[in-house]
Every structure is written in structure tokens, then in C-alpha cells.
Amino acid sequence: MSLKVALLGVGTVGSSVARILCDRQPQGIALTHIFNRNVERKRANWVPASVQWTSDVEAILRSDANVVVELVGGLDPTGVWVRRALEAGKSVVTGNKKLIAQDGVELEKLARKHKAHLLYGAAVAGGIPIIPGLRHGLAGDEITRIQGILNGTCNYILSRMEDGAQAADALHDAQKLGYAEANPSEDVDGFDARAKLVILSRSALHVDLAQSEIACKSITGVAAIDFEYARELHCTIRQISRVALRDGQCYAAVGPVLVPKSSPLAWSRGTENMVLVGGKYGGDVVFSGHGAGGHPTAVAVVSDLISLAQGGSAQVEGAISAPAKSIPVSGEFVQRHSIRLIVHDRPGIIAEIAGALAEQQINIHAIFQRPGYQQEHLPFVVTVEPCTHSALRKALDHFTGKGWLAEPPLDLPILEAEV
Amino acid sequence: MSLKVALLGVGTVGSSVARILCDRQPQGIALTHIFNRNVERKRANWVPASVQWTSDVEAILRSDANVVVELVGGLDPTGVWVRRALEAGKSVVTGNKKLIAQDGVELEKLARKHKAHLLYGAAVAGGIPIIPGLRHGLAGDEITRIQGILNGTCNYILSRMEDGAQAADALHDAQKLGYAEANPSEDVDGFDARAKLVILSRSALHVDLAQSEIACKSITGVAAIDFEYARELHCTIRQISRVALRDGQCYAAVGPVLVPKSSPLAWSRGTENMVLVGGKYGGDVVFSGHGAGGHPTAVAVVSDLISLAQGGSAQVEGAISAPAKSIPVSGEFVQRHSIRLIVHDRPGIIAEIAGALAEQQINIHAIFQRPGYQQEHLPFVVTVEPCTHSALRKALDHFTGKGWLAEPPLDLPILEAEV
């Protein structure tokens, strides 16, 4: 018996899903309904005449479709539709990271209760099969950490800056190319990546984190000068979303990080996504590819549909080998940091900085000062031995309001073996 | 009901599988039997007393185990054991690339006939979940090409040479470290990678290639000087296994290739494996990680067992969306090449080379000659516009026996958009 598939939402991803289903006609899958507001303007002549088009979501929920593909996005009213579909025993395939990050555990329970399935391979890193890879290929390992480039917009901006662009120009181009919204906060401030990190933490580490528990730091503080110093440290800068389990404690954070050039995470360019998964037995595995875009995300949706058509009963569970558990979470990775300062130069500044750091038991590792800058607006970088972010912030807060400080200091963690 | 698992072979991978099963105790999986020749010397005190140890394979085949994990390797007698297990309705999980490359299609048919399953995620690139990734995460795409670093030994040797080691030293170290056999032919001549490419072609492109149809070129012709010229071309050299479908024709080859530094395939170091999968809809996805080693390969085996325990009925098929089909195969990728020549320099050589190439309608792209070599043993490199390998070989054969030729020329394809 074929799965009858109702598609909710015919935007970029939705129309690409329809296109792949019509082109490839995967065995056991029939597209039967398409829902969109003002659906008439969406009608396409390459869709078989047998497909019913509707602007009435109730018609979908009452229909005989056994799978609802939800590509409308957002929490409201989409969350209600997804719940009602599951309660009606319809399986749901979705790319809705916000909904799954916030309510995924509850929705998976609901699905199980109604013998339906909930699949969301498209919710994280669209075209990269990270969720199926974790569930099927790495289920035998005990995953202890994830480091990911989960937001293509930030990666585009930061890799453009690595190549010499100013922050404002890179953002402007990202907006012009449709990678970033007019208000780019969701991307640059880390909220988009954080939702994906919550989903990955559940799928890979079997821990259930609330988004609000994870510290986000914006990439907007990163300037062209930071890439110059990053190069001196044989690093680049990327927005990294990471989570690690150690000694029963969970560490998680999202924000700009100095990434050594030797790390695969430094190789990502443009809007590419990349996820490094570290396991107790298998070591590190890296997945990379197109994280977004209509076609790549649609591939993830259609792959989930094929799994359902082939009877993927195991796949209803977000956490295959253990139910997601709550666990205390901290952003206090113990790690090296770099601190970029811009000062009105005068004698004694280094002594003052060294003193404030020493008060927090933080050791200076090295001081870098590139030539060619004016004394009145002099950038330099101090790197420090492993410490927590909160200890470092205490030391840096000491400088607030100092007359010699030309701009607020920027501290960046340096990625390496963690905690 | 728990799966009862019988383990055949307690070498590096087998003992690691036993270790993970005993440590993690995945739900629904019970290790019940262990087989090895002279099994007594293999007994370990961390294995539960309930496990039966035996040197009699018949005891396994007659037992109530419902899954046989085959980690003995080779074709004979292992192939017979696998067939008999499947005929007895036992599912088989194996890392045996030779057996799956040669007889996989037949064994999958046999499994289906007896309502058993055959899983072999460990047969290709051990710790990298490429086969589950293809089957579950990329099933929605139409895969058109694969480029892979599938042999860790070759990658170790070539990345050591990239760092300045001589070929002989790199091979010697690989042997000392246990990466290469005393007779390294299986690795360096490409046969190991070719078996894996056959399996990937079946899983991803749904084409059934015979190993003998795929041209293998040894990496042994690659010398230190080739890395010097590779650098001038902004390339490195890697053993690349590749397959591409285009216009109903299948192209496949294994051998050393010039890889642009901008390609992810150039980033692989040491014994790492990497697979680039190109799809019609999702574009390129890259998987990388530890391709071999006890623990990473064991993770793949245990992941397959977990799939079985969760009722992975769909997973019996090597080609999920289409049965593997036979298709003509050619090694004649049309692509740029570099030709490295070492000559006793005298006037007229370039003219002679240009003439031979022109006769085959091959255009010279550039000529590179690094300073600092003796005229009596002068290396230089000619790059040519896209052509087939056979046309190039015809031109090069023209030089055989020429007095000015100090060593046989080495031609390497240059990786780029293909065919």
C-alpha cells in the first residue's frame, strides 16, 4: 500500500519536495494533497491532476493522507496542525527546527501514543544526512561531543571576512543573496544554530536541553582585525555550536570561536554546513554539505518519506538507544581564549591587564601586536591558558570604563580538546 | 525478544565488537556465541559466562542464534558459512568487503528468499556511516557520482610524501605501523579500494559493476618530484576511487589523481577515509573519519545490529530504491591530465612531445620546469586539456624506447567537474 502524502506549504523547500516526488516517483509514495494559503497561485502543471490543492488545512487533517509533510515553519499555528495530524494517526515529516527544538520530546511521545511516526531529518543541516547518520550509522557508538557549523548565513559572513571583506559588506551581500533576513538577529546572534544544537544533542547525546539553557554569543562583535590576528594564531573564526558530555555534566555553547586551520571546521566555506561528531569508540566523524536551500533540504524530506514507506518503525524515536534525559548544562568549557583589545596606547596597560588576569588565576600565554597601527587606536591580542569564560569575563569587566580602552574587548575561545 | 548474536572471528574488530556489546549492552541484543579457531586462547574474562565459546562453526550454524556477525574475512570458507547462515534464516552482519563486492547481489537475493537480512555497513570506510547515510539520508536524491579516499594505507603513504617523505620510507613506516602488509599490493595497486567502490556503486548509484571491469592504477609510480609539481599546480596527490553516471554510461576508475587543494579530498591526512557523494538535487555531501581500525569498524557492526534489533526490514536491500542493474562501464573519464617526464635534455624534445600529443588531438595547456635539476636527469611536467586516458596513452607510447627518455612518463588525471 502506498503512503498518501499531504504537503503543507509550497515555498522553496515544499515546491522542491513536490518536484522530486513527481520526477522520481519513489516506490510506495503518492503525493495526494497540497495545502497553501491562496493555493491557486501555487498550482503547477507538472503536478499530476490527481493531487488535490486546498487552502483549507481542515481538509488535509480530515483527509485519508497518512503522512503530513509540514514545511510551513514557525510554532503557531503549525504546532497545532502537527499535533492534530499525529493525534489522527498521521505520521509527520518536518523541517521545522523551531518546533522540534522546543516541543520535539513531547511530539515524539504523542506520535508513539498514536502509532504514528515523527521524522525531521530536514530540521538540521538540510542536505547533510546527519540525523539519519547518527541514528543508523553511529548508533553503535557512544557519542560524547558535537561541534558544528549549523548556520550557513554566519558561515558565509565569516568566510567572506576571512577573505578580506568588512563585516558590514559581508552582511549586506548575504542579505542581497537571500541568505540573511532584513533583521539578521536569528542567524548572527546564534538562535537558529542553537535550535539545531538542541535537536542534535537529543539525537546524538540523548540529552534534552532547553534552548534557554544554552549561551549564545553574537558574531556581530567580530571585526576584520580579528581575522588578521586569527591568522597569526594559525586559526580562522567560525560560528561554532558545540555540546560535550563529560563526567555527568553537559557543556554547550553557540558563538564565534577561533578554529585552528588544521581542524576540518576551518575548511568550510560559504553557506556550507559541517558537523563533527566525536564518539568514544569510533573517534571523530565529519559530515559536510549544503545545509540549506530548497533542493538539499527537500532531499532530506524525501529520504524521510522513503524511510517511512519502507516501514521505518524504529525511527519514531529521537533517541534510539536511550530516551532523552534532562541534565544540568553549563557553558563553562575550560579552554584557551584570545582577547582582542583596542586601546589608546600609554605605558602600564599591559601591567594592568596582566594584574586583572592574575587576580582570576588566569595565565597569559602570549601577546601579539601587529605593526602598522596608530597609537591612538592600537589593536593587540592577548592569549591565555585554559580558563572558564566566566573567570575571563570577570577579569575583562575590570577594564570597563578605563580611559585607555578605545573599544570593548572581544574574547574568543580557541577550539581544541575540550573541557 | 532479544536478538541472539553469534560472533565469527575474534581478531581486532571482533574483539572490539564483543567489547562494545558487553560495555554498552544495547537493548534487544544478546551476545550468545563466539567462534574462532583455537578459541581457548581468545577467552576474555569481561565476556559474560553465558556466552558459548567454540571452535566448531557447525555449532554456530546449528545454534539458535538469529544473527551471525562474520568478521573472519576472505572468500573461502567464509562465503559458504555466510550462505549457510542465510539459508538457515539467520541474518548476517559482515565487514567482509571482498565477499560483498564479489557476491553481494546474490547474497542479498538469498537473504530475501529466507526472510533474513544482510547488512555490511562495516565493509566500506569502517567508522564512517557512508552506507547508512546513503540508504537513509540520501535515498531521496539521485546520486550521480562518488569520489572517495577508500584506502587508509595509500592515504597515509601519499600524505607522508606530501610532507616530504620518500615513497620507500613512507611505505616502510606504514608497514612498521601495521597499516600495510609485507606485500602491499592489495592496497597500493588499488584492489582494496576497488572492492569498496563496487559496493558503493551498488548502494548509491544502483549499478552492479564487476571488480574486473574497473581499471586500477598503482600509486607506486608516484615519486617525490610529483608532489613538487603538484604544488605548482595547487594540487596534492591522492588515491581516488570514483564512479560517475552520465548519459546512461558508467565511468569508474581507481588510482593516483591530482586533487586541487580547494577540494575537500585534498584535506584528508594520514589513514583517514573520505567520501564525496554528488546528487542531482542535494549537490555534494562529504563524509570523513577513521576508515579502519578495530573500534571504528566495530561501531559500524554494532550500528547494523541495532538496526536489526529495531526491525530494519527495509535494510536487506543493497539498492533501496532500485535493484542493482548491470551497465556498461568505462574508465575513459574525459579530463585534464598532467604528464611528468624525466629526460636527458637535448633540443627538440618538447617539439617531439607536442607533435605526438597533436597527433591524438590533445592540446597542451602548460609546461612547468622547476629550476635546480641536472640536464642529464631533467624532470618537467606538461599539462593537457581534457582528453581520455587512452588517447593520452597512445601519445605517450610513442616515446617508449626514445633515447632521451630517462624514466617512463607518469600521467595523472586532474580532478575536476567530470566527464
Image (cartoon, coloured by chain):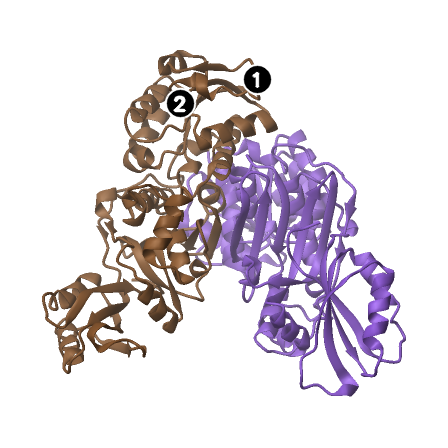
Chain colours: A purple, B brown
As drawn, A408 above or below A113: below
As drawn, A19 above or below B311: below
Q: Position of residue A299 (x, y in %)?
A: 49, 51
Assign a secondary structure to mark 1: loop
Q: Which amino acid, mark 2?
A: Lys
Assign a secondary structure to mark 2: loop
Which residue is tagged 1?
B48
The answer to which of B379 and B373 lies nearer the viewer is: B373
The residue drawn where x is 60% and y is 27% is B23
Name the quadrant containing residue A316: top right
Taking the image as shown, residue A52 lies to the left or right of residue A198, namely: left
Which residue is tagged 2?
B115
Taking the image as shown, residue A407 lies to the left or right of residue B166, namely: right
Q: Which of marks 2 and 1 is nearer the N terminus?
A: 1
How many other residues sit within 10 Å of disc 1, few (<14), some (14-19) or many (≥20)? few
Residue B394 visible: yes
Name the quadrant containing residue B256: bottom left
The residue drawn where x is 33% and y is 57% is B167
Taking the image as shown, residue B58 lies to the left or right of residue A294, namely: left
Assign the N terminus of chain B to one quadrant of the image: top right
As drawn, B304 above or below A175: above
Q: Mark 1 lies on which chain?
A: B
Q: Which amino acid, mark 1?
A: Pro
Name the quadrant containing residue A148: bottom right
The residue drawn where x is 50% and y is 57% is A295
